[in-house]
Image: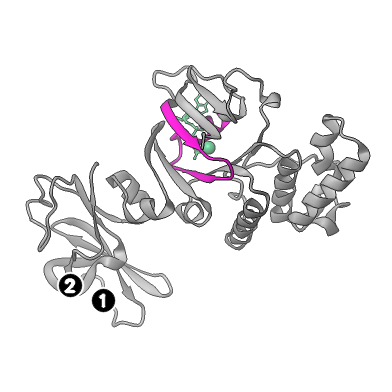
Amino acid sequence: MSDFLKLEKLTLNYGGPTPAVENLDFSMQASELVALLGPSGCGKTTTMRAIAGLMKPASGTIMLDNRDITRVPANKRGVGLVFQSYALFPHLSVFENVAFGLRLARVSSADIKRRVDAVLASVGLSHLADRQPRELSGGQQQRVALARSIVVEPKLLLLDEPLSNLDARLRLEMRSELSRLQDELGITMIYVTHDQAEALALADRIIVMREGRIEQSGTPEDIYERPVSIFVANFMGFENCFELTGGKLKGIAPAGFETGSAAGIAWRPHAVLLGQGAHKGTVVGASYLGQVVEYLLSTPLGDIKAEALASAPRHGMGEEIAFDLPQAGAVLLARR
Ligand SMILES: Nc1ncnc2c1ncn2[C@@H]1O[C@H](COP(=O)(O)OP(=O)(O)OP(=O)(O)O)[C@@H](O)[C@H]1O
Ligand SMILES: [Mg+2]
């Protein structure tokens, strides 16, 4: 199967001393949903802008559906883009907001009616077709923006943090909505987020970016369970990440297992065993998180975050407790 979208050695520059994105190689298949994940400033939006045709690459090529679109104008690419700020037309009804692109393309009135009605139904907004944007909730406006980009049937839909304006509950609701739409319509999507949970829940594949380059690309399971570097592990909730020197953590060989040539080792807070083990730490912080209490321990290895069930006896500030960093739950990291 040939690649549906293929970026080759893409370098994007705003004119600064270092490019915002450098030598990016990446490809995806039709109907795939790829999440682009990474910290602020790593080049996610810049990459989207280039794919959409809003920015000219300094070098490299973009192929879409077997066609070189590197120099094709934005409006001839068949790429839809939904931004974080969804900028609906305030004076147009929901129906007309969604119909806008089709009217521009001179689609017949009957076809517009049919297509807009179908898309509004699929995002659950049929009953609000006559409302103005200001009469809608944030989540409903978000869905209008989504409907507007889907109705023109883009070959590729780019979503740049489309849920970031929504509260936690609406985010969850929209997340499953998106997932369902993607299954139903088979749209090829790139979904930009800096929320790891969102990426894990939605994506067929996750690409983690770091400073304008790809740090790791893989299935959600790959990225969550087998991060390749301290950078990715940190991002994926391994809050206890340590560099290894000669296989040792601060001069101490992790008990009972081989670290080989790994550059780092990491544990999630729940993997740290509290109340037993060869290490000792002092409680310097405790946060009640509902199900669990998260403790911050000051230890000779550095700060350690550990979790205990909230129903277990609590540890007080300043208390010294033993802990263990067991092999089960440890992940070895090839790079820093
Ligand atoms: N218009 C611009 N002019 C100059 N530099 C820019 C411009 N837009 C972005 N940059 C720079 O390019 C780099 C990548 O920015 P980009 O917007 O792609 O980051 P991002 O990954 O989308 O971050 P965020 O998660 O904050 O949205 C950053 O260093 C940023 O400062
Ligand atoms: Mg951005």
Residue 89 in the image: state x and y as whole percent.
80, 39
Badge 2 vs badge 1, beta-carbon distance below 8 Å: yes
Q: Kindly identify the amino acid type of the residue bearing the numbered disc 2.
A: Ile
- Taking the spot 17% from the left edge, 72% from the top edge, the residue there is 321
Give residue 321's mark.
Answer: 2
Q: Is mark 2 within 8 Å of ligand 1?
A: no
Q: Classify 10 Å Cα crowding around label 2: few (below 14), some (14-19), many (20 and above).
A: some
Q: Is 39 part of what is drawn in magenta?
A: yes
- 34 left or right, relative to 79: left
Asked if one can make out residue 125 in the rendered structure from this viewpoint, the answer is: yes
Nearer to us in this view, 293 or 24: 24
- 287 left or right, relative to 159: left
Residue 261 in the image: state x and y as whole percent.
14, 45
Nearer to us in this view, 161 or 40: 161
Residue 311 in the image: state x and y as whole percent.
35, 82
- Taking the spot 30% from the left edge, 64% from the top edge, the residue there is 269
- Taking the spot 66% from the left edge, 27% from the top edge, the residue there is 77
The span picked out in magenta is 23-50
Task: Quickly name the residue at label 1.
Answer: 315
Residue 67 picture quarter = top right
Nearer to us in this view, 201 or 197: 201
Q: Secondary structure at mark 2?
A: strand
Q: Is 274 part of what is drawn in magenta?
A: no
Q: Kindly identify the amino acid type of the residue bearing the numbered disc 1.
A: His
Residue 122 in the image: state x and y as whole percent.
75, 55
Q: Classify 10 Å Cα crowding around label 1: few (below 14), some (14-19), many (20 and above).
A: some
